[in-house]
Image (spheres, rainbow, N blue to C red):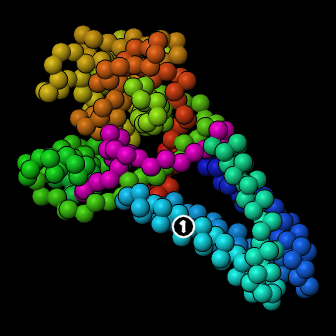
Amino acid sequence: MLSTVVVIATFLFLFILQFILWAFFLRLGLQWARVVDRTTRGVVVATAIACMFQVILGISFQLYEPNNDGNAIFLGMIELAAGILVPCLVISRVFESSFLRSLQAWFPTLLAQIVMVLMVFGLLRPFICESFLYGSNAMAPTIVGDTWRSTCPACGQTNYGSPVDIISSKGDRTPMICDNFHVNRISDVRRRVFPSDRFLVAKFLRPKRWDIVAFQFPENPKMIYAMRLVGLPGETIHIEGGEVWANGNKLERSADLSGIEYLSDFSFMRGEIWGSKSHPAVLGKDEYFVLGDFSERSADSRLWEHGAPGHSPFAVPESHVRGVVSHIYWPPERWRILR
């Protein structure tokens, strides 16, 4: 609940700030362009329309995923053109001025945009929240990447499976996981790709056990992963009987996570994996152990081969943690509060 209040309050503050700055610089621009009938009411109306359009435009283009670099460039050009043309047309219509005078009046509002960019990169992303697009199904069904879906034969809930897994199986039954964490193998799958979840990461929340945390992948810090935090600094972690044990004690899970079965061995693996009973993961004072909810299809702390400098392969250093996953905000049918 706290995360939701903070996120809403932050975005509301940024919108109000954008509105005030845009109105201020628009009035200066109107004076510069020598627009005669520059009433306060007109400034407020033009600012409200322009700010709402910018919000809608930004959300729309963020949610569209170009499938190649050419499309991305073309999309960027359209966004730039729309971001200039529409506000100028609004100013022209509200103040009954020519397009060139409206363009001149609009130009100072770029300073408002610069201030907002500085606020986003200097305040919002480092200290409040950041958005990400999930790229795998390691955390399915809690957070999903691109998926093919079916119906779980055990409970009738939605099944989730990666198209790559299904295609590579060449018609064989492929593992999928449902909303109740039942893992099953399905041969008849609808070949429609559903989009990945987009989620917010709260920077102001302190990670707790069973939270989903976003972190820099130790083997490649440029990649951002999101997985469930199960092992805390200083603990010795192992998996036994589908459960996670810390310092020899079985960890209790909340009811909504009780269906997850964590695996400690794989048929395709040779030798030990991290976190097995005979090969426990001993965490340092600033290290975490993470697991995916879709244990059979998750390349998590159990399977990593190389760690961050000065750390064990299985460990996520505290310095690599970007925050706690708090909300799934897109697509609409997947909206949910996670923390």
User: How would you rate the neighbour count of disc 1 (Cα within 10 Å): few for under 14, some for 14-19, many for 20 or more?
Assistant: few
Is residue 144 one of those drawn in magenta? Answer: yes
Span colored in magenta? 126-149
Q: Which residue carries the number 1 mark? A: 77
Residue found 44% across the figure and 19% down from its top: 308
Q: Nearer the viewer, residue 192 or 177?
A: 192
In the rendered structure, the answer to whether residue 216 lies left or right of residue 170 reads: right
Above or below residue 269? Residue 178 is: below
Residue 335 position within the rendered picture, expressed as x and y whole percent measured from the top left: 47, 56
Residue found 66% across the figure and 72% down from its top: 84
Residue found 55% across the figure and 35% down from its top: 323
Residue 230 position within the rendered picture, expressed as x and y whole percent measured from the top left: 42, 26
Above or below residue 320? Residue 248 is: above
In the rendered structure, the answer to whether residue 231 lies left or right of residue 258 reads: right
In the rendered structure, the answer to whether residue 298 lies left or right of residue 93 reads: left
Residue 23 position within the rendered picture, expressed as x and y whole percent measured from the top left: 83, 68
Is residue 13 one of those drawn in magenta? Answer: no
Residue found 49% across the figure and 66% down from its top: 75
Would residue 97 be visible to someone looking at this image? yes
Query: What amino acid type should be assigned to the residue bearing mark 1?
Result: Met
Q: Quadrant of residue 272?
A: top left
Tally of numbered tags: 1
Would residue 240 be visible to someone looking at this image? no
Above or below residue 91? Residue 28 is: above
Q: Nearer the viewer, residue 291 or 132?
A: 132
Q: Secondary structure at mark 1?
A: helix
